[in-house]
């Protein structure tokens, strides 16, 4: 963080309701300090009823930009001047950039999700993927898999009608990108068949988050391909039961830590036009997780 805040200091932040749990201020201020940028990043609680007023205020106060978290990711889109392709496809904004009073919304969760996979050495192109869950986080992950040209994505869920609605909203884009989409209840033979052929299995449900660490989606890793990759976007605990059981059988695993850091780094680059020090951001994240009793939210 800057040691002296002056009239030239750029203001940034994260809005949500509630927001006290957010790790973004610690991570972004660490990146700001490492880059030597004259800026400061804070958290501000915005009630849903006051969202449009908050956006107007940040615009008029010339905030350089801000992150957006629950419950404002969809609602804020109507208050912005322009929406990036990823955010439009996902239907949610997690980053806003203010260029001379013009507000543009982005979604960097796609960059974070795919960046984590890339760093782990996995390429989704032409692969069979099972996606567990169809909530808000699933939209960014599904869009990322489609952009990466996954061959087939099967959504395994408790409520197939919810997943089918999600698929329908992506149908046209999936057709253009060549990704086949399907949805089914995760306790059916159809799902078990898809799971047994999956190259990548991604958990986007909250099952297994702190404090409910014994929970997991109803899958048996003994039915998976020996080289299937396990990805859980939860980052607290560091290793969920979903990942622990996969690792015990020799599967390569990845948690949501890299996704969180890389989506934050992508936002940093949008604001400042330079790369963030992701090593510093990750170290800060781990320090915060070690010293805080968090509820284990899926992404910030």
Image: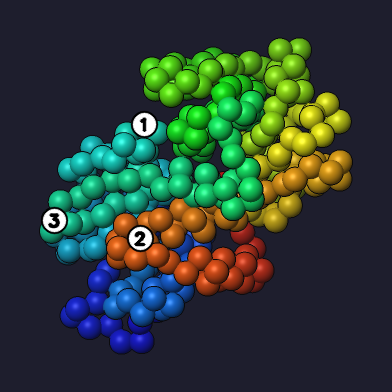
Q: Residue furthest top?
A: 189
Residue 58 sits in quarter: bottom left
Q: Position of residue 151 (x, y in %)?
A: 57, 24
Q: Is residue 245 left or right of residue 296?
A: right
Q: Nearer the viewer, mark 2 or mark 3?
A: 2
Tag 3: Cα neighbours inside 10 Å, few (<14), some, or many (≥20)? some
Q: Nearer the viewer, residue 35 or 245?
A: 35
Q: Earlier in the sequence, mark 2 or mark 3?
A: 3
Residues at marks 1 and 2 touching, judged by CB atoms closer than 8 Å: no
Which residue is tagged 1?
89
The furthest residue to the bottom: 4
Q: Secondary structure at mark 1?
A: helix
Instruction: State the scheme by which the image is colored.
Output: rainbow
At horizontal 46% and vertical 53% (from top left) the residue drawn is 263
Measured in 3D between alpha carbons, the distance from the residue under mark 2 to the one under mark 3, in whole angstroms, is 19 Å
* Left or right: residue 280 compared with residue 271: right
Q: Which residue is mark 3?
A: 101
**CA–CA distance in space, label 1 to label 3:** 24 Å
Please name the residue that numbered disc 2 is placed on: 269
Secondary structure beneath disc 3?
loop
Where residue 8 sits in the image (x, y, percent)? Answer: 19, 78
Local secondary structure at mark 2: helix
Residue contact at pointers 1 and 3, CB within 8 angstroms: no
Which label lies toward us, 1 or 2? 2
Left or right: 138 as drawn, with respect to 40: right
Alpha carbon distance from label 1 to label 2: 21 Å
| Other-residue count near label 2 (Cα within 10 Å), few / some / many at <14 / 14–19 / ≥20 | few
Residue located 37% across and 62% down the image: 268
């Amino acid at each position: 963080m800057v040691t002296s805040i002056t009239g030239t200091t750029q203001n940034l932040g994260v809005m949500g309701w509630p927001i006290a749990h957010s790790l973004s201020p610690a991570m972004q201020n660490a990146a700001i300090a490492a880059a030597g940028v004259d800026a400061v990043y804070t958290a501000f609680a915005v009630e849903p009823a006051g969202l449009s007023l908050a956006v107007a205020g940040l615009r008029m106060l010339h905030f350089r930009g801000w992150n957006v978290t629950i419950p404002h990711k969809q609602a804020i889109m109507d208050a912005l001047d322009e929406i990036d392709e990823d955010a439009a496809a996902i239907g949610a904004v997690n980053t806003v950039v203010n260029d001379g009073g013009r507000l543009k919304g982005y979604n960097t969760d796609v960059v974070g999700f795919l960046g984590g996979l890339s760093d782990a050495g996995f390429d989704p192109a032409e692969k069979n993927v099972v996606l567990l869950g169809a909530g808000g986080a699933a939209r960014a992950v599904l869009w990322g898999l489609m952009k990466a040209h996954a061959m087939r994505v099967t959504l395994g869920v408790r409520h197939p009608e919810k997943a089918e609605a999600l698929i329908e909203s992506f149908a046209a884009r999936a057709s253009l990108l060549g990704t086949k989409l399907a949805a089914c209840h995760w306790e059916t033979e159809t799902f078990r068949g898809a799971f047994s052929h999956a190259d990548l299995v991604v958990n986007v449900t909250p099952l297994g988050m702190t404090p409910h660490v014994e929970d997991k989606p109803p899958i048996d890793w003994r039915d998976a391909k020996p080289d299937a990759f396990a990805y859980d976007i939860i980052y607290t605990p560091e290793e969920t039961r979903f990942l622990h059981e996969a690792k015990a059988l020799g599967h390569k695993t990845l948690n949501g830590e890299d996704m969180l850091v890389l989506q934050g780094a992508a936002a940093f680059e949008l604001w400042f036009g330079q790369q963030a020090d992701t090593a510093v951001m990750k170290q800060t994240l781990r320090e915060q997780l070690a010293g805080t009793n968090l509820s284990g939210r899926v992404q910030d």
